[in-house]
Image (cartoon, grey):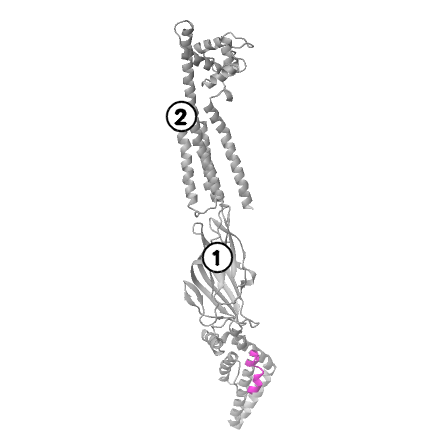
Amino acid sequence: TWGSSAPHRPNCARHCTRAMARRHIRAPAVDDAALSGLARAPVLHCAACWLSAVARGRAATAHAAEAAPLHVRHRSGRAARTRAGLLRPFRWPMFTLAVVLCTLWRGAAVPCSEALQSEVIYNITTGRGYDRKEVAVDLEGGSAEISAQLVLTDLVKIDDVQQTFTVIGYLRSSWTDTRLIFSDLGMDKCFKFLQFPLTGNPARPYASDAIWDPTVHFTTALQSSYGSWFYMLFPPGTIYKSVQFSGIFSCATMNFAAMPFDVQECYVPIVTSAKDISVIPKDGQPIELPFGNIETPAWVLDSYSDASPTRDSLTIRLAFRRRWSHFILTDFVYCVAIVCMTWSGFFLDHNAPPARVTIAVIPVLTMLNRMNVVMALTPRIATVTWLDTFQVVSLWFTVVGVLEYGLVQVLMHLLKQRSVQLTVLRDLVQELTGVHKGEGRLPLQRAVLQTAIQSFQVPTQPGQITRHTLRSGLHKYGCYYSAEQVDEVFLRMGIGEESHMDRGMLVQFLDKFPQPTPVMSVKFRETPLPLKVDAVMRVGFPLAYCATLAALWSRAATLLQ
């Protein structure tokens, strides 16, 4: 357009592109001094190029016209004047449109290639005398300040026995080095950032060999591996580094006293290998959770905070809360069911030893097995956990079932001995009755009988046997008569309600020993001692266990707050 020849237009386009990339223009028809003021205006660069192309085109046209014959020059002049008259109203709009199109084309055609990026990196790291061994310098001229952040994407495992936890995420760090500013080179329009290659392997953090790197790393990592990374330099000299990691970290501060309602606090110190460098949380947030809270079936991240004692390192506190619903279903309900099994044994007949022994011993063995399973999940520590307390209490309640049946068997043996003594006493009475008739003399048996009769008499009134003392005396010999049955005995012997039995009537009763009518119900005090123990355990055992559970759950409620 504007009279320029066709060969000049593509040359101008290429020339304009190189000028914008290198911020200078070489055009023969335009003075370099005039273009020096346009060095910071890319749009005017392009316009100047096109003006120089128009000037060259017009000069070539005038030279061709002078060399042509006269009649050709007349025809060419009329044609040129005709074209100029037609195009004159569109000249400046077309010029403006050309400038705009050139600017847009320049944005798509500037060769911001990797080769140019490598040239810029070489210029700022080598051409300026940059020394990567020197610590980065901030905007105020002092040592740079490192901003670090832990991006957690997954919580893999928390090992209670080894006291470790495994996480996957990214370690981000950023700092400013004024020696690496490249906005003054004019490349900030071409490159939003420069990406540096890193060297390293999955066993150690990746670092750059071209510029100074603080080598941010973990101090409590027992095992770590590193993967993909980003390492970018922005025009103001800000460096952003992000390295993917997977690590097993030590958590030696675990406290299992509140297990399974415990919250374990673990600390992750992030330090740098450089001296006198401060490490602070990036944007005030030491942790970022891009995919929401991290958790496992047994643990969940409850909270996190910055627990740095000094600015020399960044210490991140991670609080993991245990999911206790699993322990309620597998341990609490299980143990309660076992204790209930022990309680059911008190309703069995004490004269059935195989059944009573089986239902007393099996819960104890089952509780011991369950306790071993839980102990395998925790390290051998001196702290007694809530779950340990609950299981030990439940174990002792099952042991009480075994001890109770042992006590019942002892009492049953004593009851049988007293029954034998009553049988011997009755035989002795029959022998002494013959002695009183003159059939023989047995002074030793008579003394034994007198001692036995004293257990039936009223202590303050020798020789008198009341209904109460008779029933008490029979109880001592394993014969448990009710009050109604004792009244029936007195009635059969012809003794009134207000009268008492004397010694002779007692000997007569022991001689014949009439059996009273059985009763439908027996009161607690009129039952044998072994049956009393079973009756007490049927009521007292569940009440005591429920009171213990209430105390334990009140403690658990305090731990959950």
Instruction: Give the percent coordinates (x, y) of residue 155.
Output: 47, 54
Q: Is residue 410 left or right of residue 291?
A: left
Q: Residue at x 42, y 9 (%)?
A: 432
The answer to whether residue 249 is visible is: yes
The residue lying toward the viewer, choosing from 436 and 16, is 436
Range covered by the magenta-colored residues: 30-45
Classify 10 Å Cα crowding around label 1: few (below 14), some (14-19), many (20 and above). Answer: some
- Type of amino acid at the residue the image marks with label 2: Ala
| Residue of label 1 | 153
Residue reaching furthest to the front? 443
Queried whether the magenta region covers residue 42, the answer comes back as yes
Point 48% across, 14% down: residue: 454
Q: State whether residue 4 is above or below residue 516.
A: below
Q: Are marks 1 and 2 in contact (CB under 8 Å)?
A: no
Residue 349 visible in the current orientation: no
* Residue corresponding to mark 2: 352
Q: Nearer the viewer, residue 244 or 214?
A: 214
- Name the element at disc 2: loop
The one of 312 and 140 positioned closer to us in this rendering: 312
Residue 173 in the image: above or below residue 456? below
**Coordinates of residue 24 in the picture (x, y in percent):** 53, 82
Residue 403 spot, x, y in % from top left: 44, 31
